[in-house]
Amino acid sequence: MRPENQSTSTAAVLGGVGIGAALMYFLDPSRGKRRRALARDQAVHAMRKGEDGVEATVHDLNNRAHGLAAEARNRLRDDDPSDDVLVARVRSELGRVCSHPRAIIVTAIDGDVTISGPVLEREVDNILATARSVRGVDSVDNRLEVHASPANVPSLQGGAERTGVRMELMQEHWTPAARLLVGAGGAALTGYGLSRRDAPGALLGLAGAAFLARSITNAGPRTMRNRADAPAQTVIKAVTIAAPVDQVFRFFSDYQNFPAFMSHVRDVQDLGNGRSHWVVDGPAGTHVSWDAELTDLESDRRLAWRSLPGATVDNEGRMHFEPTGDGGTRVEIELRHTPPAGALGSAIATLFRRDPRHQLADDLVRAKTYLETGHRSRDAARAASTVRNGALAPR
């Protein structure tokens, strides 16, 4: 078989596998309907966000066009500003490079500007260069009081360090116009790199993909670093179940009942000595597993667990059981977990309602229905034929 034919055949096979996996995911008899509904909701949300983004981009481009036109008109005509206008221009520019602009006194007479007042030594050069660059300034008379430090100078106390005007692409967040231009360039670079099918093309494709991702997320290095260092997340939910506390506790204390009402838990095995092995749904139809251990147990009152070291998803939780006056049980659950890929992974999970906050709320509703009526939820991970440890049998 010729190399190009073999490559085409491989691509066709991989494409067929991907289409088949997508069909299996969305046409699943038990959970396909819910998945399709979630996908539809997310598509509608994405369309609305896209419309807002287009409107903001058009507005930004329109403002930039008017600004460039005004700047061009000003540069083409003779500029002889009044003294007050020139002072205002200089002060406006000094605010970008001086940490204490209010301490500086600016005067102007027929284009000759005088600058005085206390300043820090490290800012003098930037202040003078900025003043000379202002349109309409003929000369600058330097009468600044230079101080090596702000100590004992009241007007130099506090303030914020200025770095001057930074190039827009070096800023943490980009304007809609910049995101549009960089995103378009990144997409074009990615396509060109993939079309080359060699090592330099791969590098160009990676660079283009990075620019495209940067424009879509609008998150600079500092934001991404904060997301990666995001702390563990805690979710607390409570539900009242119309069943006696001893029965509810026996049901929840046996982890092997969890797949009967938790849609993402595929299997739980009791390993003995308070340890258990968990298998849950991961992204794109994969499975994630880890081992956990029981850390606290008081019959009919509370239980707690945590994952063992090396778990794919570091997590821990506790459950508190309290009888109500009418013979029911109030169950409070607290989950603490560290999402894979930090807060970015958590945001992606939230987008598809796969995060613990949404899952826990849905699962508690299933557990309540299960214990009160005995009816199994169709979208539970495993529809068990019986319920263990004294819970109600399905009707």
Image: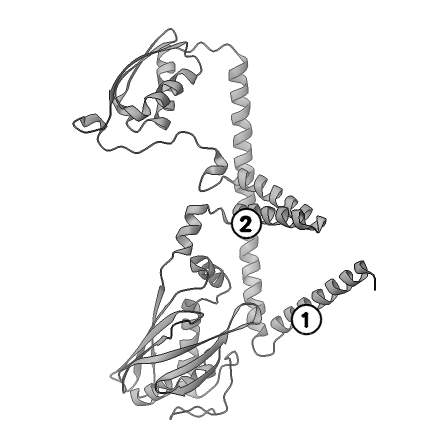
Secondary structure category for the residue under label 2: helix
Is mark 2 in CB contact (under 8 Å) with mark 1? no
The residue wearing badge 1 is 20
Query: In this picture, is 16 found above or below 124?
Result: below
Q: Position of residue 54 (x, y in %)?
A: 56, 44
Kind of residue sitting beneath label 1: Gly
Residue 372 seen in the current view:
no
Q: Residue at x 57, y 64 (%)?
A: 39
Of residue 395 and residue 142, the one placed in the foreground of this image is: 142
Name the residue located 44 percent from the left edge and 73 percent from the top edge: 362
Please name whichever residue, 248 or 109, is drawn nearer the observer in this view of the structure. 109
The residue sitting at 51% across, 21% down in the picture is 71
Is residue 81 in view from this perspective? yes
Q: Amino acid at mark 2?
A: Ala
- Asked whether, in this view, residue 70 is left or right of residue 108, the answer is right
- The crowding category of the residue bearing disc 1, from other C-alpha atoms within 10 Å (few below 14, some 14 to 19, many at least 20), is few
**Does residue 385 sit above or below 38 in this rendering?**
below
Measured as percent of width and height from the top left, residue 70 is found at: 52, 22
Depth order, front residue of 287/234:
287
Label at residue 213: 2
How crowded pointer 2 is (Cα within 10 Å; few <14, some 14-19, many 20+) is rated as: some
Tell me the distance, in whole angstroms, between the alpha carbons under discs 2 and 1: 27 Å
Q: Residue at x 57, y 71 (%)?
A: 285
